Amino acid sequence: MDLEGLAALRTPAGADALAAAAEVAGGDPLVAAGALRSAGVPPQLAAAALTQAELRRRAARKFGAAAARMFFTRAGLEQATRAVVADRRARRLRAAGARSLADLGCGLGADAIAAARAGLRVYGVEADPVTAAMAAANAEAAGVAELFTVECADATTVDVTGVDAVFCDPARRRSGTGRRIFDPAAYSPPWDFVLALAERVPRTVLKVAPGIDHGLLPPGAEGEWVSVDRELVEATIWCGPLAEAPRRATLLSEKDGPAVDGSGRESVPSHQLTGTGDATAPVATVRRYLYDPDAAVVRAHLVAEFAASVDGTLADPSIAYVYADTAVDTPYARRLEITDALPFSLKRLRAVLRERGVGRVEIMKRGSALDPEQLRRDLRLTGTAAATVVLTRVAGTPTVLLCR
């Protein structure tokens, strides 16, 4: 996609091509292309429309119905924030007193649009001309073009002294190849520039990959890990006056939808666990119930805080499974009841499962090098019952837990 192709899609003929492409998206690409050619759509416009239709179809998971009106690049969609996460972040910024925001590296505009909807005046900066043009088009589609404007520029050259908050989501994929970048020093803008933003604008928020090393977080900042429907999606660094706790795990759900808080404003229901991030949980033996904490809890280093909430312990100090004697309903973990705890032996495990008529197994693991699919094949089960097999370590010993 180039600027000329995007402009063509925004004409009446382009709108017709997008509508036709939406009807055939998700099927055989050759059949879809043939359908648009038969409808008289020029080949270049048809290709662009089909690409957008496919990206819009994929984007529905992040943006819901709004995706059908937006424009995307593959790399931009990959890094774009889910609407439920962006909305919550925008409300938190607004509640902290922010009224204007510089979005450095705004991409396709997901976070900027959410901030504008929350009432912030947003100045987006995007280095790639096509992505910048798409962000502006998405602002128009969302009805927030008066509050969200985009400048095509290098984020490191922009003056941010006129805003009271900064949001930066540095690019974590290589231009041209789309390959992930794991070293923050290779981000764009570079990590040293990103960290220095908080010195220029105290209300600085940084979106980073959830696998970031805790040691890279600035002193005094809050590290927040966010999951949506038990899928870990991102980490956020809240700097200066925005920091409320050293570490936070936030659990959101797309299924909850918007709720209304006491002020009458819409808010997304969430569960939040906070703590220092350096506490350790007590270690004991395997107990009746196994709790598998949400990935956001694990990444935020809040397993000890979670364990305390269910009166739980670990069975191995390096494994994030929590064990307890009582069943506690909690949003922060999945709970299983343990029926057997056995030293790992393929022969013995196969015999026990066959004896109980188990033919279907869910296999979970932490601290085990075994491949679950290979184990499934090696078990050669034929029964009708179901069970959960947990591969882990207990006091350093490879162990298998049979659960329900």
Image (cartoon, rainbow, N blue to C red):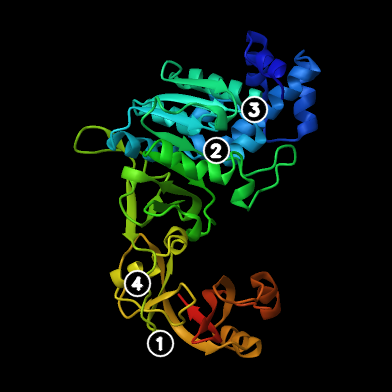
Mark 4 and mark 3 residues within 8 Å of each other at the beta carbon:
no
* Residue under the image location 78 percent in, 14 percent down: 42
**Label 3: which secondary element:** loop
- Position of residue 58 relative to residue 224, above or below, is above
State the separation of the CA atoms marked 1 and 4: 14 Å
Mark 3 and mark 1 residues within 8 Å of each other at the beta carbon:
no
Q: Amino acid at mark 1?
A: Thr
Q: Position of residue 305 (x, y in %)?
A: 33, 67
User: Of callouts 3 and 1, which one flags the residue occurring earlier in the amino acid sequence?
Assistant: 3
User: Of callouts 2 and 4, which one flags the residue occurring earlier in the amino acid sequence?
Assistant: 2
Residue 128, numbered label: 3
Q: Amino acid at mark 3?
A: Asp
Pointer 2 local density, CA inside 10 Å: few below 14, some 14–19, many at least 20:
many
Judging by the rendered image, the residue that carries numbered circle 2 is 80
Residue 360, numbered label: none
- Position of residue 226 relative to residue 75, above or below, is below
State the separation of the CA atoms marked 4 and 3: 46 Å
Mark 3 and mark 2 residues within 8 Å of each other at the beta carbon:
no
Left-right relation of 399 to 306? right
Pointer 4 local density, CA inside 10 Å: few below 14, some 14–19, many at least 20:
many
Quadrant occupied by the N terminus: top right
User: Of callouts 1 and 4, which one flags the residue occurring earlier in the amino acid sequence?
Assistant: 1
* Residue under the image location 59 percent in, 39 percent down: 189
User: Of callouts 4 and 3, which one flags the residue occurring earlier in the amino acid sequence?
Assistant: 3
**Label 1: which secondary element:** loop
**Label 2: which secondary element:** loop
Closest to the observer, 159 or 298: 159
Residue 285, numbered label: 1
Nearest to the eye among marks 2 and 1: give it.
2
Judging by the rendered image, the residue that carries numbered circle 4 is 307
Left-right relation of 44 to 329? right
